[in-house]
Image (spheres, grey):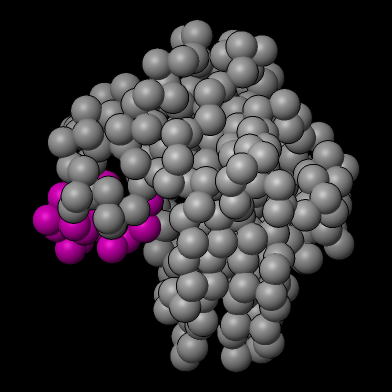
Amino acid sequence: MSLLVTGSIGIDSVQTPFGKVEGVLGGSASYFSYAASFFSPVRLVGAVGPDFPKEFLELLKSRDIDIEGLDIRPHSKTFRWGGNYTGDMNEAITTDLQLNVLAETPPTIPESFRDSDFVFLANTSPALQLDLLSQLNGPKMIVADTRDHWITENRDDLLALLPKITGLVLNDFEASILTGLDNMVAAGQSILELGPRFVVVKKGAHGCLLFEGSNICALPAYPTNKVKDPTGAGDCFAGGLMGYLASNELVSFTALRRAIGFATVVASFAIEDFSLARLQQISFDDIRARLEEFRTLSSF
């Protein structure tokens, strides 16, 4: 079943205690697309400039990712971000931010993509997410990401978006500032009252919580000591989540529980190297094997 993602596509430079890379593929839609492509074909919508390296285009095309929705603007420049992680690497210090094409008019969803059944609205302004939704022909499932900036600066637009989507994915800090609650169980349940059918609260190294109606599922993070670069881990988590759901055409709570298991495993691979390097080295069999290991580790 068709899976559409809209979001940023960029060029990153990242430094962590384990090394430094410059000019690597980044952006929420890039990470999401690559992760989701292990499970399902992906339709990618985003914008870049002519400075976007050809090898990045080839990398995306080497997967089951349809880039018809990639708008290469001849007089623009690609979004660029630089970050430095220290200590426990929970959050990056931004050292460079060039919005470039992201500060321009957003791309339009191609007509051939508008019948997409599963849609992920990666992190961008809720007003833009609402506009993108208006271009679609009744998708089966719509899931959105957000961040603290949009919650505090564009709250009204976000509150208008929430009743129109199926699911919301956010981290524990964002859940807290959205609801004013520090207890994540209370926060997740409170967000459900704002409109979405389900909510996933990511807690970094402490796993995630899934809420749907009166149902709650808690999963730990996959235990690993190979954390090189956490950039894009949340987007890979979302890609695993939506890729699994789209590939199985399922939206039940049981499917959501299995989906966050796959999502956790995909993210655990992504953090083991910079950019998409680790994901380029694995297959779906590796993901499935780690999922079974994760299931054993999590059972009691």
Pick the front one: 37 or 127: 127
Q: Quadrant of residue 293?
A: bottom right
Q: Measured from the top left, where is residue 259 in percent x and y?
A: 58, 41
Q: Main secondary structure of the magenta part?
A: helix
Q: Is residue 4 left or right of residue 170?
A: right
Find out whether residue 288 is within the magenta segment: no
Extreme residue toward the front, this view: 75
- Region in magenta: 170-189
Q: Is residue 170 left or right of residue 153?
A: right
Q: Residue at x 43, y 46 (%)?
A: 103
- How many numbered marks are there? 0
Is residue 159 visible to us here? yes
Q: Measured from the top left, where is residue 44 in percent x and y?
A: 65, 33
Quadrant in which the N terminus appears: top right
Q: Residue at x 18, y 52 (%)?
A: 152
Q: Is residue 286 left or right of residue 12?
A: right
Q: Is residue 184 above or below residue 195?
A: below
Find out whether residue 178 is within the magenta segment: yes
Q: Measured from the top left, where is residue 175 in percent x and y?
A: 26, 54
